[in-house]
Amino acid sequence: MRQGAGTVSGASVAGGARRARNATRKAASSSGLELLERAGYVIRGVLYTTMGALALGVALGVGAAVAVAGAVGFVGLVAPHLVRRAVGSDPARVLLPATLAGAALVLGADIAIRLGPSAVEIKLGVVTALIGVPVFLAIIFRERRLLEGAPS
């Protein structure tokens, strides 16, 4: 294990536990600004400050994760989309299945790399990107069709 990996992994686990605990707030915030304002939350005054802090936090978290894990970037983005159809869009219900799906995705890609005949070493990030790019293109095209009003 590389130096510092335990620190980032511990921070990731602590962050995941906090996200699971705050799942109700996430469900409310994913329902839209108007619903939150009707529920009594003050949104407009703090929205830009919160979004800036959120963007900074996400950038720092992604940077730390990539520094430790390498370029396996699509796993954390693809896994929730893969399980969302099975469990629904509630963030509390997506968290655990997405975590398990991400682990299975990395394990499957690693097994494919080790068992596949190759003269050169294929990186894990390349295989996960080969899985992730088509999934994201399908999601983008499906959402685009929905926004244009065509059935999916």
Image (cartoon, rainbow, N blue to C red):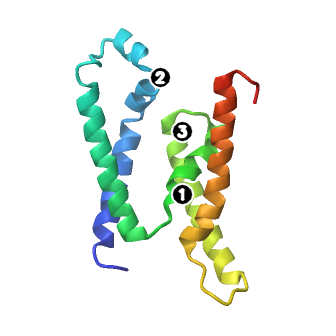
Where residue 6 appears, x then y in whole percent? 31, 70
Most extreme residue toward the top is 38
Q: Amino acid at mark 1?
A: Phe
* Residue 86 at least partly seen: no
Where residue 93 appears, x then y in whole percent? 54, 38
The residue lying at 65 percent from left, 82 percent from top is 114
Q: Secondary structure at mark 2?
A: loop
Q: Amino acid at mark 2?
A: Ser
Alpha-carbon neighbours of circle 1 within 10 Å: few (<14), some, or many (≥20)?
Answer: many
What is the C-alpha distance between the residues marked 3 and 1? 20 Å
Q: Is residue 73 above or below residue 17?
A: below
Alpha-carbon neighbours of circle 3 within 10 Å: few (<14), some, or many (≥20)?
Answer: some
> Which tag is nearer the camera, tag 3 or tag 1?
1
Tag 3–tag 1 contact (CB < 8 Å): no
Q: Which mark is on residue 31?
A: 2
* Residue occupied by mark 3: 93
> Which tag is nearer the camera, tag 3 or tag 2?
2
Q: Is residue 111 above or below residue 13?
A: below
Q: Which mark is on residue 91?
A: none
Q: Is residue 99 above or below residue 103?
A: above
Where residue 142 appears, x then y in whole percent? 69, 36
